[in-house]
Image: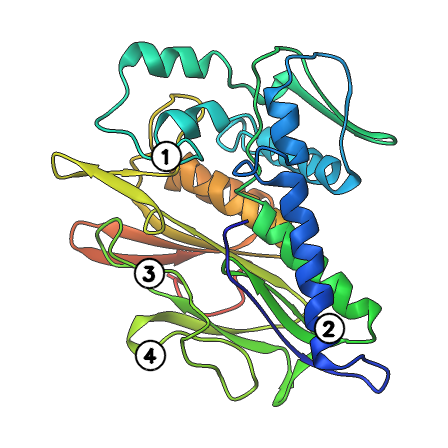
Amino acid sequence: MGSTWSAKYRPAANTPPTRAVERALQARLDDLEQQMSTWRADSALSRFNTSRDTNWFPVPRDTAVVVSEALEVSRLTEGAFDVTVFPLVQLWGFGPAGRRKGLPTTNEVTAALARVRWQKLEARLDPPALRKSQPDVAVDLSALCPGYASDCLGEVLEARGVRDYLVEVGGEFLARGNGTLGPGWRVGVERPSAGAGDFQPPTEASSSTRDGGWKPPAQALATTLSLVNQSLATSGDYRNFFTVAGRPYSHHIDPRTGWPTESTIASVIVIHASTMRADALGTGLTVLGFERAWALAQREQLGALFILRNGERLTARSTDCWPGEAGKN
């Protein structure tokens, strides 16, 4: 998946040695990458994308589960999140085809948009398979695969008797049980800069909290909170972008227009029981823009913290269900 990962846990009496656990975690990640990476031509998802067959296409169960979730979030966000966005991702130079020189033409955007619409895709779990109604539809799961991978690593640890852990894949966190200082795991929420692309995502090299959790350097913090049997995912335009004539173009592409988003949302942090759902919703909320994203988050009773650009300043706004004090007006 092209991401870093980490796992902190308190072993139980029957938990295997650390190296054995590490190998099991890595094996699970390797399996998911083999299934769902668009950067691997031999992955199950890449084979589906290149196939022009409109009949049911067998895929591993994990892939069907993730696509099913992606379709649900596509519906929930009214297409602001769209699992069939891959042609646009490629066109704008954010996919395995690599960076492009300059901007795509209007005709190129229109042609790519004709291949994008989540209603053109179906998923079933038994037997696991995908089906597209248009032969050139292609799927991109990168906006929720890291979250799903975090959920899967939690399952690996649970199967080995571990009940207290904090796992992270690509900056998407799953916390269960207790850290060394009591209930929950302390996690720092980073503060983006006012300009797109100026901020770096979490890295394992940043400092740890005393309970074995994670937080960035103090000067980069927007807030800290304790995750108690919850997941946290972050979406922002600082992770991946390019600039043409001094103007940044984000990797967040609006699948309804075919163009990168222009949003006052610098970052949105979502808390949910499912890391996969939090991951996908973060992208969908970013693309929606603040007013519609706020309405959706409140309606769905999401814990969400929005970091908003206001000229050269950043302001925070949090939903009623956000557990911390940051952004409470």
Residue 327 image point, x, y percent: 39, 62
Q: Please name the amino acid that badge 1 sits on.
A: Gly
Q: Which residue is mark 4?
A: 218
Give the structural element (helix, strand or loop) at label 1: loop
User: Mark 4 or 1 closer to N-term?
Assistant: 1
Q: Which residue is mark 3?
A: 200
Residue 171 image point, x, y percent: 49, 60
Residue at 60% x, 45% y: name it.
Answer: 300
Q: Which residue is mark 1?
A: 98
Q: Please name the amino acid that badge 4 sits on.
A: Ala
Give the structural element (helix, strand or loop) at label 4: helix
Above-or-below relation of 216 to 110: below
Left/right placement of residue 316 relative to residue 177 reads: left
Give the structural element (helix, strand or loop) at label 3: loop
Q: How many numbered marks, from 0 up?
A: 4
User: Mark 2 or 3 closer to N-term?
Assistant: 2
Left/right placement of residue 31 relative to residue 238 reads: right
What is the basis of the colouring in this image?
rainbow
Which quarter of the image is occupied by the C terminus?
bottom left
Above-or-below relation of 311 to 84: below
Q: Residues within 10 Å of mark 1 (few under 14, many from 20)?
A: few
Quarter location, residue 184:
bottom right
Q: Please name the amino acid that badge 2 sits on.
A: Val
